[in-house]
Amino acid sequence: MNYAKDVLVSTDWAAQNLNTPGVRFIEVDEDILLYETGHLPGAAKVDWQQDFWHPVERDFIGADEVSALLGRLGIKEGDLIVLYGDKSNWWASYAYWFLKYSGVRNPLKLMDGGRQKWVAEGRELSTDAPEFTPTEYPPLTRDESLRAYRDEVKAHIETVRSGQGAMVDVRSPDEFSGKVTHMPNYPQEGVLRGGHIPGARNIPWARATNEDGTFKSADELRTLYGSEGVTPDKDVIAYCRIAERSSHSWFVLRELLGYPQVRNYDGSWTEWGNAVGLPIEKSYRED
């Protein structure tokens, strides 16, 4: 597929390496109960809310807590970590971005197609709860170059207007236009205003995938983003609702296409749509 980085493994490769020493599989699903119904044999479970999010603040756990998490999962510094999950690796991409942001240096990969493709192919699932020997995972330092904060996004609007930057809103067209403030069939998360950040281009995250959940080819992806002016010479910020869908697009742009400057705005629309004094564009008008 001529991707910029070797960050994907196939379901065939995964099946052949379930018991390979130094290869660790981690399942991260939107539906946190899916793991118990059956998972790749030996795979660990990560609950994105309980394991990644700070218990009180609207933020992530710190680097020390990430080290402790990896230690509890029995992961060593040199292990290859293969992430996969439901919804075309939607939350697995979020975990990939979060671990990169947290400074994890282990080689990280996604199983292309995720749980969806594995199950569709009738491959083995296990309901056994694996046990791991804890490790002393080394200290980590966050890589802040991968994350965008609200004030940085506000300043970035001028960069977009000057043609030096790009903003990618990966939500659905109705969310982008302001017709709705959340995804269909999902709970309303308290966003007061609909619309999008000025200058953002709407490229829904799922347009980067095939029907089986795998990623489209590099040529198709370059065309998809390039046709909207999102090119590798620009400083790019991606956002969605709470950064789960934009993590998928971040992965496509930075890891598969090799764009050098791509940040994920994890505050996303739940922050921007509620903040006082931030500009919003809205293209939806009720008749």
Image (cartoon, helix red, strand yellow):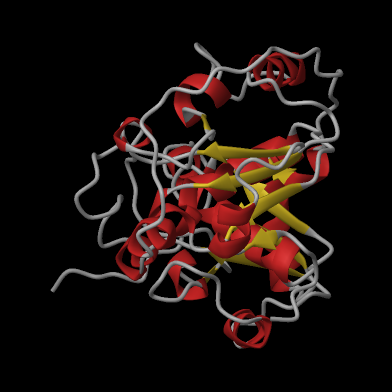
- Vertical comparison of 25 with 182: above or below: above
In front of the other: 259 or 175: 259
Residue drawn at point x = 71 percent, y = 16 percent: 71
Residue drawn at point x = 69 percent, y = 67 percent: 253
Q: Is residue 141 visible?
A: yes
In the image, residue 108 lies at what x, y percent? 73, 47
In the image, residue 216 lies at what x, y percent? 56, 78
Quadrant location of the N terminus in the rendered image: bottom right
Left or right placement of residue 138 versus residue 14 in this view: right
Left or right placement of residue 5 versus residue 117 in this view: right
Q: Quadrant of residue 230?
A: bottom right
In the image, residue 53 lies at what x, y percent? 54, 23
Quadrant location of the C terminus in the rendered image: bottom left
Q: Quadrant of residue 136?
A: top right
Residue drawn at point x = 24 percent, y = 70 percent: 285
In the image, residue 239 lies at what x, y percent? 55, 53
Q: Quadrant of residue 33?
A: top left
In front of the other: 73 or 243: 73
Residue drawn at point x = 49 percent, y = 31 percent: 48
Q: Residue furthest left?
A: 287
Q: Is residue 58 visible?
A: no
In front of the other: 117 or 66: 117
How many numbered markers are drawn? Answer: 0
In front of the other: 112 or 193: 112
